[in-house]
Amino acid sequence: MTKRKRRALIWTSSIFGVVAIAATVIISTWDWNKAKGYISAGVSKATGRQLSINGDLKVNLGWISKVRVSQIQFGNVSWSSHPQMAEVGLLDAQIDLWQLLKGRFVLPEVTLSQVKVVLEKNREGLANWEFPAAPTTVPQNRTQFPVIEKLNINDGTLLFANQETKTEVELKLTQADAAGFLQAPVTLTAKGYYQKQPLTLTLEGSSYENLKSSKEPFPLKVNIAVGKLKANINGNLTEPLQMKGEDVTLDVQGDDMANLFPIIHLVFPSTPPYKLKGRLKHEGNTWSFSNFAGRVGGSDLAGTIRVDTGPKRPVMKADLVSNLLDFKDLAGFIGGDPNTNQSATATAEESNIAVSKTESERIFPDQRYDLERLRSMDADVRLRAKRILAPSLPIDDLDAKLSLNNGVLSFTPAMFGAADGRMEIYSTFDGSKQVPQVKIDARLRKLDLKRFLGQSSFAQQTLSPIGGQVALSGTGNSFRELMATASGNTFLVMSGGEISELLTRLAGLNVARALGVVVRGDKPIPIRCALLDLQGTDGQMGVQTLVFDTANSVISGEGKIDLKDEKLNIVLTPVPKDFSPFSLRSFIRVTGGFKNLSAFPDPIKTGTESIFQKILNVLVMIAMSPLQPRDLGLGKDVDCGALIASIREHDTHGVVPKDFYSSEPKDGSG
């Protein structure tokens, strides 16, 4: 190289060096706050929303450049009640310029503090995150996703509100940390609150290279706990950025399925603790939980649930099967509490405070219906139980169809195999009104009375089919209020069969005949027919007809059933068809609450509410017994054919078939 060229090269290098040093000095001493106005104007013009940087903007250039911005606000749409769509107290970000030269957008570390994001949809379906006039800056496919090696979020809040579905969701993160790189696994840990319930979350996925590859699914494992709900997810996501294409195994457990509503906004009745495992899949607007199995309380449960989130109200379709269903687990369907057992840690004093003596004597649940939940979704559900565990009830199996449409809940029907016959329940709960209106239509077909009476000796000598119908309607915000306003009619009819002779003798206080049965041994006598016909309004059901006719006596009755106070007050009149030399004939009053009924003689119908009345009744009964004409055996056979025919006239559903009463039974012992 010549001396002249060497001198020119030195001068050129010096000039470039001076320019580089000058540029470095200018950039390092540049007040980046002057650029805030340009940045805000550019973003505001592109999005139509105001971007404000109210704090400092600092940039430290280098191969790992650092950007620090505070007090950022991004305006919301005009129809929102929240002025800001997003607020960030502090943003700290690092940018790897060397990776940027290679065509990779790599952020070694990002820290966000005091973050608040509001996502909304109005009644017309417009979303505040849509910017029609602006080119999208959100990655549209996995290859555009930036690599964030480390992400920290401190004190973050996400609010989501959908006015179309009246859905509101709140997520608060006290701390969230994520990490990952090109070939290192992506991990996330977070803790905070979801819908005001404690939240913990851990996530482990594949690498960023796998995330950015559009040809392969993205595997992940998630463990999440929200309140008492715990869920484990293990599987693949086809479109992880859009959270679509889930094909994972879901293992979920919790204390009550009704508590899922604030979390996933699907309506379930109250249940005992549950644990279910199955396949969760997401395609378009449809989520499915298929081939799941597990337990709900004392019942096993399996089946498939599909939810379509596309309509204005989500639509759930479910096909559920149980091999052994514990009947008490169904209490939530009528507003009861299936978790009847007190917690093992509850003290006796806490239990006494929680349940008063008056409430403990009630059988109708008083839990108020949540109408907003019923109106939030539609449903079509079928539940089949092959066997039912109900020690106190003769129920064998269940096939129930349930539909929910715009707040109207219907059983169409729920069919129980019961007492060797069938019980069908057609009911409609109209929750679309301010005060729900309810209609109940229960039809009893050929139920075996013997199975209702347990294993007593009387029960073993009793055999007769029962038919009947319970048709009631009412209004109320709980099942108890519904029964207190119930109006309608109920009838139960029985024909043929047999009953214990000793039982009928004792019912008539026929001492001599009862002693004779004891000496020679009890034996069944024929039942000719029996009928109970009730009608009433506003919870007061009056006895229209009460007749029980056997070969040796006929029992009639009068009185009422109070569904409001859950009490019964009926007077029975036993009349023998044969003479007895020694008896204590008397009216018998059956009274008390549904849980504690009692029967006591009431010869002159003065009542049996007090001890004094009961003592007086016994004395009067003994004194009047020889004078009562019923001792003469004046009881006559009831015209059973005409009695049952009168019921069949308003039996529109044929629960009493034509052959229910066809001929007179043969006379038994007198």
Image (cartoon, rainbow, N blue to C red):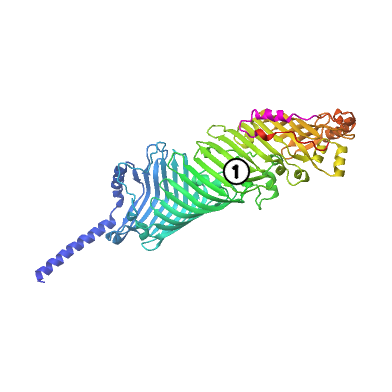
- Identify the image quadrant of residue 450: top right
- What segment carries the magenta color? 636-657
Using the rendered image of the protein, determine whether residue 108 is visible from the camera's viewpoint.
no
Give residue 488's position: percent from left, percent from top. Answer: 64, 29
Q: Compared to 152, does 352 lie above or below?
A: above
Residue 482 as seen in the image, left or right of residue 222: right
- Identify the image quadrant of residue 521: top right
Magenta-colored stretch includes residue 638: yes
Using the rendered image of the protein, determine whether residue 242 is visible from the camera's viewpoint.
yes
Give residue 517's position: percent from left, percent from top. Answer: 85, 41
Instruction: Tell me how many marks there are.
Output: 1
Which residue is label 1 attached to?
332
Give residue 29's position: percent from left, percent from top. Answer: 28, 56
Residue at horizontal 52 percent and vertical 52 percent from the top: 292
Give residue 643's position: percent from left, percent from top. Answer: 71, 29
Residue neighbourhood size for the residue with mark 1, other residues' Cα within 10 Å, grouped as few (<14), some (14–19), many (≥20): some
- Identify the image quadrant of residue 560: top right
Residue 227 as seen in the image, left or right of residue 448: left
For the C terminus, the image quarter is top right
Residue at horizontal 52 percent and vertical 33 percent from the top: 432
Magenta-colored stretch includes residue 231: no
Q: What amino acid is found at the position of numbered circle 1 in the picture?
A: Gly
For the N terminus, the image quarter is bottom left
SS at badge 1: helix
Residue 389 as seen in the image, left or right of residue 63: right
Residue at horizontal 34 percent and vertical 45 percent from the top: 52
